[in-house]
Amino acid sequence: MTLPTADRPTMPDGYGVPPTHEGLLAWDAVEERLRDARVYWMATTRPDGRPHVVPRWGVWLDGRLLYDGAPTTRHVRNLVANPACALHLEDGTSPVILEGTSGPTTAPGLELGRRLSEEFARKYAADGYTPAADAWEGEAAGGLCAFVPRTGLSWTTFPTDATRFRFP
């Protein structure tokens, strides 16, 4: 994965965002928070324009969030019609806010399936969720979706480290 570029977000002058790039967050620190998060909030748009927000379990691998999503769920139906969405972590004080696209993906194959299985088990075994490496293979498999970021915004000490990320 190519690393995103980092710069300052555009915000009103009164917010106090520094004019220099000194103190920007490093993407690897933000990505670590994405890997370790247990719950991700996804915002999609219904066909009639109304918003829809749903919590998702998932694993951050290879620069994207992979998560289960049956084709009949509201959020997946929304994404099929309009893949643009936002993904947030639960922390409103030190947020990670990503915008990008998401939707159903093809079966990952057994090697990626093994990695997914291990990560889901690491994060959710205590909740009873430990899918097998082949859980996303074949006709009876569950749906697998992938969120790919385009832009991001994060900080840990606002406004001094407020950072915007732009993905290639």
Image (tube, rainbow, N blue to C red):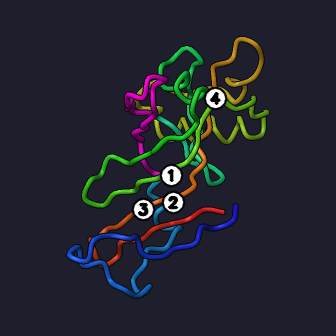
The label nearer to you, 1 versus 3, is: 3
The label nearer to you, 4 versus 1, is: 4
43 drawn magenta: yes
Circles 2 and 3, Cβ within 8 Å, touching? The answer is no
> What's the distance in space between the residues labelled 4 and 2, CA to CA?
21 Å
The residue under the point 38% across, 71% down is 10
The residue under the point 67% across, 42% down is 115
Kindly identify which residue carries mark 4: 144
Circles 4 and 3, Cβ within 8 Å, touching? The answer is no
- The image quadrant that residue 51 belongs to is top left
- The image quadrant that residue 33 belongs to is bottom left
Circles 4 and 2, Cβ within 8 Å, touching? The answer is no
Circles 4 and 1, Cβ within 8 Å, touching? The answer is no
> What's the distance in space between the residues labelled 4 and 3, CA to CA?
26 Å
Kindly identify which residue carries mark 1: 35
Kindly identify which residue carries mark 2: 31
Circles 1 and 2, Cβ within 8 Å, touching? The answer is yes
Mark 4 or mark 1: whose residue is earlier in sequence: 1
Vertically, is 113 above or below 81?
below
The boundaries of the magenta stretch are 36-56
Mark 2 or mark 3: whose residue is earlier in sequence: 2
Q: Considering the numbered disc 2 on the image, is that residue within a helix, a strand or a loop?
A: helix
At label 2, the amino acid type is Glu
At label 4, the amino acid type is Leu
The residue under the point 61% across, 62% down is 167
